[in-house]
Amino acid sequence: MTDLSPDVVLSVENLSIDFTLRTHILHAVQNVNFQLKRGKTLCLVGESGSGKSVTARTLLQIVDKPGRIVDGSILLRNGTKVTDITKLAPTGAAMRAIRGKRIGLIFQEPMSSLSPVHTIGSQIIEAIRLHSDLDKKAARARMVELLSQVEIPDPDTMADRYTFEFSGGMRQRAMIAMALASNPDILIADEPTTALDVTTQAEILDLIKRLQVERGMAMLLITHDMGVVAEVADEVAVMRFGRVVETGAVDKIFHDAEHSYTRQLLASTVKLTSHVKAADSTAALSANAPEPVLSVRNVSKVFGWNNGAKALRAVDNASFDLYPGENLGIVGESGSGKTTLGRLILRITEPTEGKVVYRREPGSEVDVTRLDKHGLRAFHRDARLVFQDPFASLNPRMTVKEVIGDPLIVNGLAKGKALEERVAELMRLVGLDPLGMERYPHAFSGGQRQRICIARALALDPKIIIADEATAALDVSIRSQILDLLLDLRQRLNLSFIFISHDISVVRYFCDRVAVMHKGRIVELGEAEQICTAPKEAYTKSLISAVPNPDPRDKRLMHRHRFVAPAIEPAHV
Amino acid sequence: MNANDQITLSPTASNIDGPAISPLKKGATVSTAAIGPWRLIYGKLIRQKVAMLAGAIILFLYFIALFAEFLAPALPATSKPQYTYAPPQGISLFTTKPDGSSEFQLHVKGYKVEIDKIALRRSFVVDENKIIPIGLFVKGPAYKLWGLIPMDRHLIGPYNLNDPMYLLGTDRLGRDVFSRLVYGTRVSMSIGLIGVAVSLVLGVVIGSISGFYGGWVDTAIQRVIEIISAMPTIPLWLGLAAAIPLTWSPVNVYLVITVIVSLLGWTSLAREVRGRFLSLRGEDFVTAAKLDGSSEMRLIFRHILPSLTSHILAVVTLAVPTMIVAETSLSFLGIGLKPPVVSWGVLLQDAQNIRTVATAPWLLIWPSLAVVLAVLSFNFFGDGLRDAADPYDN
């Protein structure tokens, strides 16, 4: 057995993992090498399906069934000796002693990684007592200490709360406390902030980084976000299709990358930190502006009984205009009411009050909120929705031709040969090969599916497209491709977009004007460039400064603007 | 990130390399691109060995039901009073000629009468010395296949029409249990299908309405379902069956019984369909279809129902055995099918008393085995189908 150099805690050597599936063998991880060093953070970065999570899970031998280690070794420093983890039985005592005690793991999804039927405290105490012989009282004291380390306010009382009483960020903090329960010397964080809002993400990253430095742990952070990498990494390993294509110090990766894929990944991230000026955009704001195509006035949505104590004002008095040929962004964190606002405009959800005026041609006005069934169908032909999840928004049992052709059929616009030609035309328009029209959605990747969704939205020659987090489920390189496609389509088809997103960089890249939503209200509305570089409102400032900057020489999180919510909270948060 | 999605690349994919994949066998292609959902379900189902075996047994049982007249050596109603409670005979392949050499000749052994000296009871035992030659595709009693085609060939039977061949023994009236079992398969297996068809229509329509519209419609329908499922089934059937006029022909009674039996079946299916509708109603692809301008009818029948057909199939498969058992128990209790109709339940009726079971256990064993086999097969197959029903769940 090879010996490890003194600062290396864990060394992965030539690791290969295969998944034997029904139709083929997937080489999920191939010949991967990396080392975790004491007090250093290694970021494993890659797009979905690159094998980064599988690699991390293998370190703890918790890979799901069809996956197995076919080659390589994982050497863990164990006192003066070195243990090869791949040689241990996954269910054996030796392996269990490593899990939690030597290597802590933080999962991506704080919603499902904590038990809903036990208190937060009891779950952490369990983790403590598994690896130590502390009695109940001492374990509780240790648990409270851990909770205060992860900056949960009033840890003694909070420990007796249940998971559902914690917000996403708090849950992730509790998860971190659990991972740290027995002082592991290696911490694996698998996309620890992906499910969180940017401001929460900034806080959690901050916390993890600080704890890691304080405790001198080695950390393996898995992420798809180059911004996060730049903020926390010391070293980076870029993975693609199961192989590590490049490893190096963070500065070298960001400023002197060798592999073309690394450069491509960076380029698509950096690209999104800029703004594209559309040729004729923001003419809307000039004095001789055309009439807006859509005017939203004082729209509110109250869930629960009107004005009752428990009523939730999901959207509160929102007003804005959408001009022809404009991209309007609506940004906000989860629960800000941005998705509800989009649905109110289309009346998928009925607004409680306010009106939405639609002008098909200059001069003609329709109040969407008063339309009958027939009128609403006509409006839905002009205003189309593109969904967030390209997997859920396509019926898995319909071929691409049926999906794209369906709006044409139900509106009696085309059938038979003409339908086929129109579908082919639409597919070409969104950059898909019409040859794939007889295939089912499962044969397409996420980006391609989103193109199908866009083609379906375009089928009826719409005027307005409401894109609800349309790029959120996509990898960064695909994301910029889809945004470019939408920009191109806007020019060619004279569309107006309402682009709903939680991702500031996407909005900045894509939109002309941006509305920032916070707790149901539009707190700021202005030009994208201005919002992103010189925001006026305190909330917008904190939001913008929490976005990780993909440049390790200019870390933004350390000196970000913190927003303290005003004392009077809107009811029921 | 289980990485087993995106296994194929479309023609326009920008990434040239792609995930590292190798086929299970050398030279095989790994594309699933153009495969439809039904092929995927089939692919999942075919890997479940037990379900496939159960499916084969079900097919075999329906094959028997379809060609009952041909497969049965005798007519179900033909009684031979000289052979009452005759025990089953085994088929032998070779006969011994007088010179000692053996010769291939399919045959069964005849019967001889033994009289119990104490009870003075006459009983049949197999006589090892009496050889009755039998053969395949022999001429036997005339019948009409499916009531239409006059034929007299049987799969198996004695060469001499008057020779006794009772592979599974005879009953109280000297009727061939094997033939009756074969004919019973037809009735018992089809009553399940007809009953399920009725409850399928009821269940899908009512369940769809309940799940799609929700609100008070849903509440009303769900309460009705609860009331129906709260009723004790056996007394309900007893009451309904008692209402059937005695003068009706067995065929009419048979149809009415199926309807009565299916009154139980539709509620569970309706609930299943409703649950699926409730969850699918909020799916993005349904909202998308709604925004495309689809009518409610189109939403239900074009977009939502196709996503549950495989689930419905699974539930239906699991409902068939309930129907079979229901028919069997009704007939066993004497309120379901009645002679001269032959079903497994009617056959079991003959095995109701302990004396019969003691002297002629084959009257109990074979019909019960048939019921158990059919019910288990449907259950295993239905379970497999349910597991395979959603090809997109991982």
Image (tube, coloured by chain):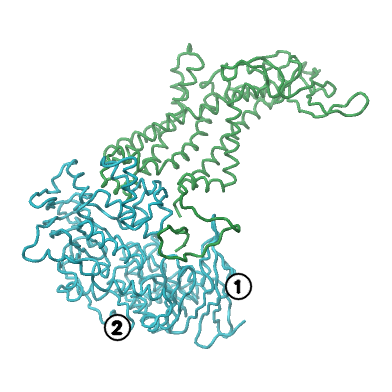
In the displayed structure image, the side of residue A447 where residue B108 appears, left or right:
right
At label 2, the amino acid type is: Asp
Dots 1 and 2: beta carbons under 8 Å? no
Near mark 2 (Cα within 10 A), the count class, few <14, some 14-19 or many ≥20, is: few
Label 2 sits on a secondary structure element that is: loop
Near mark 1 (Cα within 10 A), the count class, few <14, some 14-19 or many ≥20, is: few
Q: What color is chain A drawn in?
A: cyan
In the displayed structure image, the side of residue A442 where residue A198 appears, left or right:
left
Going from the N terminus, do you reach mark 1 or mark 2 first?
1
* Chain (green): B
Q: Is residue B214 visible?
A: no
Q: Is residue A323 above or below residue A398?
A: below
Residue beneath disc 2: A554
Judging from the image, mark 2 belongs to the subunit labelled A
Q: Is residue A338 above or below residue B169?
A: below
Which of label 1 and label 2 is nearer to you?
2
Residue beneath disc 1: A87
Quadrant of the rendered image containing residue A69: bottom right
Pick the front one: A10 or B289: B289
Residue A212 image offset from top left, x and y in percent: 40, 81
Pick the front one: A289 or B312: A289
Q: CA distance from mark 1 to mark 2?
A: 43 Å
Pick the front one: B80 or A333: A333
Quadrant of the rendered image containing residue A489: bottom left
